[in-house]
Image (cartoon, rainbow, N blue to C red):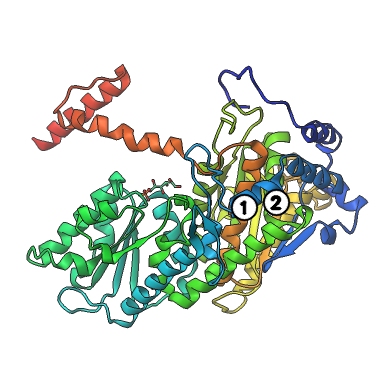
Amino acid sequence: MPDGPRSTSAPQERAALAALRAHHEEIGTAHLRDLFAEDPDRGRRLTAEGAGLYLDYSKHRVTDTTIRLLVGLAEEADLRARVEAMFNGEKINATEGRSVLHTALRRPRGDSLIVDGVDVVAEVHEVLDRMASFARSVREGAWRGHTGQRIVNVVNIGIGGSDLGPAMAYEALKHFSERSMTFRFVSNVDATDLTEALLGLDPSETLFIVSSKTFGTLETLTNARTAREWLLASAGGDQAAVAKHFVAVSTNAEKVAEFGIDPANMFGFWDWVGGRYSMDSAIGLSTMVAIGPERFEEMLAGFHDMDTHFRETALDRNLPVLTGLLGVWYRDFFGAQTVAVLPYEQYLKRFPAYLQQLTMESNGKRTTLAGVEVQQDTGAIYWGEPGTNGQHSFYQLIHQGTTLIPCDFIGFCRSLNPVGDHQDLLIANLLAQTEALAFGKTRAEVEAEGTAPELVPHRIFPGNRPSSTILARELSPRILGTLVALYEHAVFTQGVIWEIDSFDQWGVELGKALALRILPELSGDAEPAHDSSTNALLERVRSMRRETAE
Ligand code: G6Q
């Protein structure tokens, strides 16, 4: 439960919650060993399939009754109606008064959705077409730099939602990318990020994509200005070079023009696309240049596959709904604080970082849509690393520590780089981990191995550690879209249960304003006026700087 004062006007608790609590009393301590022994078919039955993904949730601490009760909770929260409200463009982002229409970004050409009198799907395809012709001209060498050089380097400058999606997607789809080109991603205002990204690049062959929904983000504008100086220094200060080496992705044409980027070189999107839901909008321009418009279209089709599955499939066979509800089950009934995401696919190495923003920025909230304190815990902490690497570090705690950590294992039957027996070893490890986590190793089993008595307690694995296994054929652009949409909609499902606004981010907005006050105090242009700790730290930074300057 969150700290702090409780609102006195707490809403009436849902009936399904009481039923779930009673059910948790009954089966909360049941061991997966027993659940499997009593129900030999559960490994086949507690599964769901859709949009090219297979979900095995049988290694969760649930029974059919649990799923029925969780689905009842979703029904009581009116999930179906909320889903329709989102897909139809109702202003469900209540605190910002906005529609939430990332699903419109991947609706097929020819579809139509009228919101506030505008066909948003037609607008989406208009931008996609402009992106495609730009991406093609860069890839084919028709778009040239200021001095006539072919563009071979693309640097995306953006942060948060304008970075994590493109950076993740580039890594995930590298196999399909144009290998004669270099793609880099700069986000941090720490100059090291930009400096390292530009190392070895020739400005005359480099294109910057400045990605910022607002075009007012300090980090992005600072990096973009420095990048512009870097370019101009090599172009003898000729401002005309900017038009050939800078394009923008934004909703703010005015600020883009102010920066000096020709609005003709701007790719737009709309206020109904949240930053962390924007990798399939124009924010994905770097992805499209990397993999080409056709592959990008396949990715969009994958997103749409999952959108359709989410919208149309019965709740108890619905992958995002089940994933979201299992998250609620552990968070609110077992007190689990985190979820580990463990892709057994090296190309998905940035996927956990991407999911961190998607899940934690969306559901890290403590106030309901009605403006009162939530009555249960909300968003879990998401984290993870690709397998098998994690097995050699933090899995120890998941196996034998004192904290319950539900895990999502993600695996692919075929490798994009089929070499020797690597893929068999990878998949064998994935399956072995889920099995070991669920069933553990009993004292009797450890003793039967002839283990020295003093070591027996150390070698017991309690098991009963829950996990989902998500399988797909191979990591294609289409499956990447499907996978991202799976989590987008799981997050939405949870937000509906918790009655929070999963689409605002006031915590991020605060950060954007805070540093500006400290800046003049750091340089000595203003006297520090904070608490004693912040004042002393500011003084210390100033004095250390004076020392190093001497
Ligand atoms: C995402 C957040 C946040 C945002 C960045 C960048 O949902 O709102 O991560 O994407 O702060 O914002 P801009 O795209 O406006 O630069």
Q: Secondary structure at mark 1?
A: helix
Crowdedness of circle 2 by 10 Å Cα count: few (<14), some, many (20+)?
Answer: many
The answer to which of 287 and 264 lies nearer the viewer is 264
Q: Residue at x 78, y 46 (%)?
A: 71
Residue type (three-letter) at the residue carrying disc 1: His
Q: From this view, report whether residue 114 is shown above or below residue 136.
A: above
Answer with the quarter of the image where residue 8 lies. top right
Residue 344 location (% of width, % of height): 60, 62
Residue 222 lies, in percent from the top left, at 24, 49
- Residue 135, position in %: x, y? 36, 74
Mark 1 or 2, nearer chain start: 2
* Residue 277 visible in the snapshot: yes
Image height of 324 relative to 180, above or below:
above
Q: Is residue 448 left or right of residue 279?
A: right
The residue that disc 2 covers is 321
Label 2 near ligand 1 (CB < 8 Å): no
The amino acid type found where label 2 is placed reads: Val
* Quarter occupied by the C terminus: top left
Looking at this view, is 335 or 154 the one in front?
154
Q: Residue at x 62, y 45 (%)?
A: 339
Q: Is residue 402 above or below residue 127?
A: above
Instruction: Please give the residue where the numbered disc 1 appears in the rendered image.
Output: 489
Tell me if the residue at label 1 has its CB under 8 Å from ligand 1: no
Viewer can see residue 58:
no
Label 2 near label 1: C-beta < 8 Å? yes
Query: Relative to residue 317, is residue 383 drawn left or right?
Result: left
The label shown at residue 370 is none
Judge left or right: residue 488 versus residue 273. right
